[in-house]
Image (cartoon, rainbow, N blue to C red):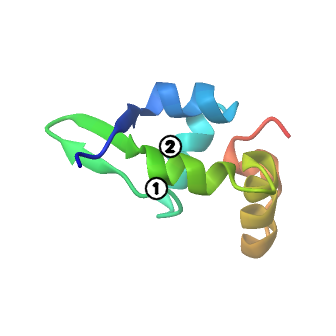
Amino acid sequence: MSEIFLTREETARTLRLSLRTIDTLIAHGDLNVRRVGRRVLVPTEEVRRLAGDAGPRSLVRNLAEARGQQSSELGSKV
């Protein structure tokens, strides 16, 4: 079965996060992506993992706390 991918923009809309937050998660290695040429694609499995039980905003808060940052520094509107 072939994998289904979302764009960064679709991922941000789906998770109700800013595009900046998605880019930060990618940059820190917290969101696995596939690069096809200049396109950055997010597997739907990654979106499901982020959505999880706690929700994406909780994930951003937890990542920020683990790094000793404010969640606003990760680009979230929490």
The residue lying at 80 percent from left, 35 percent from top is 77
Question: x%, y% of residue 21?
Answer: 62, 42
Dot 2 alpha-carbon crowd within 10 angstroms: few under 14, some 14 to 19, many 20 or more? some
Q: Could you tell me the amino acid type at mark 1?
A: Ala
Q: Could you tell me the amino acid type at mark 2?
A: Asp
Circles 1, 2 touching at the beta carbon (< 8 Å): yes
> Between 12 and 71, which is closer to the camera in this rendering?
12
- Looking at the picture, does residue 6 appear above or below residue 54? above
> Between 1 and 34, which is closer to the camera in this rendering?
1
**Rendered image quadrant of residue 72:** top right
**Viewed as shown, does residue 34 lie left or right of 75?**
left
> Which disc number belongs to residue 23?
2
Question: x%, y% of residue 65?
Answer: 81, 68
> Between 52 and 22, which is closer to the camera in this rendering?
52
**Rendered image quadrant of residue 18:** top right
Q: Residue furthest left?
A: 37
- Looking at the picture, does residue 20 appear above or below residue 43? above
> Which disc number belongs to residue 27?
1
- Looking at the picture, does residue 1 appear above or below residue 7? below
